[in-house]
Amino acid sequence: MWDFDEGVYPGEWREVESPVNTPLYDVVSTQNGPAAVGGKGKVIGRKPDGEWGVLIENGPSGKGRALRTVETTDDGKRIWFAGDGKSIGYYDLESGERNDYTNVDTLAGNPGSGNLSGTIGALTVAGDRGREKLLFADTSGLILPAYMDEAEGENNLQMDWNFSSSPSGDTAIKAIESNTAGVGYAVDNNGRIYETTADEGWEQIGIFDADNSMYSAEIDGEVILVGGGGGFLYEREADGRWTPHNLGGFTVRAMARRDGEMLAGGAGNLVYRENNSKWGRVPWNGGTTVRGITFGKDGQADVAVCKNGTIIEGHHDDGGGGERSTATATRSA
């Protein structure tokens, strides 16, 4: 168990004004800045001057269905999102182009099973724009792979949809991530972790003694992080060992990691760790559940988004040119 001492936090964190009055479920950093998704199909983005605005009003299909998850291509030039009613789509940040793939599992010529549930709760993207590989996961345990097909030439790329699979049976997939090589990792509601195999199958790699459900995942280099109930966060190193951390009892709904820095959030909590050693609470009035977290790119703000629509931003200085510092934590027996 980790006991959190009073201390200074990692830079200045504050709530900022949102352009929408809906829940927010996920956030990602792009070449243009952070982008988030939420209720009624809203997709919002942060301008360089700090103002948030609406990119898409009512989802990829125009039907206003909630979007639950968002990811970016490796180059940060395109965002993909998915959610209720089998909603799937993308938005190109340079051209403004948007495409709708909602209900793609029922389209003619798609080899998928056609059995995706009504809600796609997780997705992951590997590769640059125009060459990306994707995995979409639903609440009934199905995972649908897709990738950009280069057969038609660079200026006429097409999406190629593969057969869906169910590594967890009918247990909901709560989170899915991929590394830079395109290897996928899926987390189910029973605390089991799966990795893609060379023949496009899945094998379980953990967590074999977890007593809590898992809800979030993050990959940074060779490190895999999984967060779940009871405040538990598990960290898998390159040698395959899973190290548990107890962050204090709240369900870990969202995580981000960058070069040893970590953020984790959940019900009324947002915590921070630096250089794989010290944990500290980010001062914040709480009262809602953090659903998405991202570290900013190239000096952009770090961002957490919440179920009640709150946006919280963290900046890397103390507002007066001081150095970044962290809260401290001591470990009890």
Image (cartoon, rainbow, N blue to C red):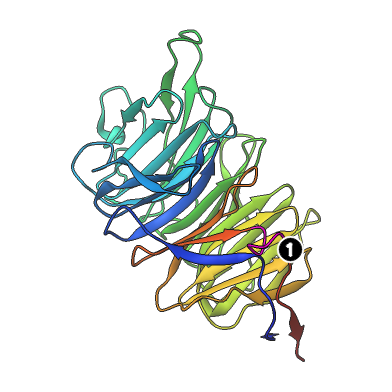
Left or right position of 16 against 99: right
Q: Is residue 67 visible?
A: yes
Provide residue 218's location: percent of width, then percent of height.
60, 55
Neighbourhood count class around disc 1 (C-alpha, 10 Å): few under 14, some 14–19, many 20 upward: few
Q: Is residue 1 visible?
A: no
Q: Quadrant of residue 126?
A: top right
Depicted 62 relative to depicted 97: above or below: below
Q: Position of residue 241 (x, y in %)?
A: 76, 63
**Residue numbers of the magenta segment:** 316-323
State the quadrant of the C terminus.
bottom right
- For residue 325: magenta? no
- Residue occupying image coordinates x 67% and y 62%: 320
Q: Point out the image quarter for the N terminus.
A: bottom right
Residue beneath the point at 26% across and 37% down: 103
The local secondary structure at tag 1 comes to loop
Magenta region, main secondary structure: loop
In the rendered view, does 225 fall on the left or right side of 45? right
Pick the residue in front: 81 or 187: 81
Indicate the position of residue 86 as horizontal and vertical percent values. 29, 44
Instruction: Residue 71 in the image: state x and y as whole percent.
Output: 49, 43
Seen from the viewer's position, the closer of residues 164 and 224 is: 224
Please say if 107 is above or below 321.
above
Q: Nearer the viewer, residue 219 or 239?
A: 219
Kindly identify the amino acid type of the residue bearing the numbered disc 1.
Answer: Gly
- Nearer to the camera, 236 or 27: 27
Q: Residue at x 23, y 48 (%)?
A: 65
Q: Which residue is mark 1?
A: 322
